[in-house]
Amino acid sequence: AKMEGGKRFRFYAREMNARALERMDLEHELRQAIERGELELHYQPQVDLRGGQVIGAEALVRWPHPAHGLMMPGAFIPLAEESGLIVELGEWVLRRACLQNRAWQDAGLPPISVAVNLSARQFAACDLVSLTDGILRETGLNPNLLELELTESAAMLDTTAFIKATKRLKDLCVSLSLDDFGTGFSSLSYLRRFDIDRLKIDRSFVRDIVHDPDSAAIVTTIVALAHNLNLAALAEGVETEAQLRFLRSCDCDEIQGYYFSRPLTVADFERLLASARRL
Ligand code: C2E
Ligand code: CA
Ligand code: CA
Ligand code: CA
């Protein structure tokens, strides 16, 4: 039966209220989880295609939630972005990842670089450069072993400020990569103005390279573009042997994806590094 106007409104209002309250709860819980250091980082290996060895790892945040289980970033990063909590979350991730890599170096594991995802809002809200500098000093991590993953959306927010920040980050000797390359709206002219080291080819192109000639052409072209600009090309989301073969054939430098390994807990990643497993 059709609800009468007023009733229908009250129904929707109640629904919306419930959802808003749920959101506020989650936001409150996330703030607490950050403050109490309850988030976790998992690490996904990045592998050199020529030598086959692990050369780096991307730090990916997880939230072990008492009621919802292990929450993936898709379930809370958008909330963190909207609420501004991403700034604190991002600072925690950066510090944690640097501390962790320093500990791996101290333990005598093979040197690798750890890549940290940065949100566009971190560029706007804080002095990312002095934050990074401070964390590097505090942890004593070799800046060459830190990579920051930027997205085109960060560049588009305030291009001038972004270019300045990336220059100063390069002065600190950290590496910079452009994440999800090919999916943004930015123009290629950005590539001339940013001093970056690596393009990460988005998973959506890699997924179809074997069956879709257009995706294959795009990936081949991005790899060539990267090399012509003196950048490394890393393919994300590599899942199959056939994709790997294609990426070798177009001279891609590095891969990351389930084919080699899913993101791993600290303990599992340490075991992998110590075992020196190769592609
Ligand atoms: P991203 O930066 O593109 O990270 C790669 C995502 O692809 C990860 O998802 C990873 O688990 C997944 N992946 C890797 N290899 C494969 C594969 O072979 N197949 C498939 N289907 N997926 C693969 P995850 O961990 O769920 O993270 C999702 C996104 O959340 C990330 O996308 C990133 O944008 C964001 N994120 C994660 N950690 C952080 C963080 O610390 N800070 C910020 N600002 N964002 C983060
Ligand atoms: Ca990333
Ligand atoms: Ca990506
Ligand atoms: Ca360069």
Image: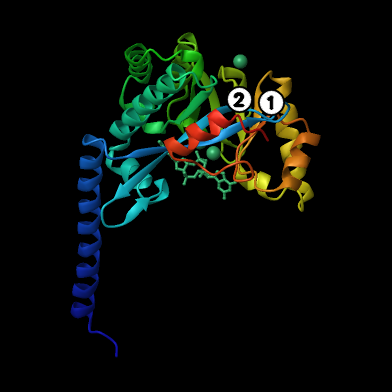
- Report the disc number at residue 198: 2
Circle 2 residues within 10 Å: few <14, some 14–19, many ≥20? many
Q: Which mark is residue 88?
A: none
Q: Could you say where residue 136 lies in the image, as x and y percent from the top left? A: 38, 15
Residue 36 percent coordinates (x, y): 21, 36
Q: Which residue corresponds to the image point at 49% horizontal and 11% vertical from the top-left? A: 173
148 sits to left or right of 88: right
**x and y percent of residue 179 in the render?**
54, 33
Quarter of the figure with residue 190: top right
Residue wearing tag 1: 226
Quadrant holding the N terminus: bottom left
Could you say whether the residue bearing mark 1 is in a helix, strand or loop? Answer: helix
Three-letter amino acid code at the position of disc 2 = Arg
Among the 4 quarters of the image, the one containing residue 134: top left
At mark 2, the secondary structure is: strand
How far apart are the two marked residues, 2 and 1, measured between alpha carbons?
7 Å
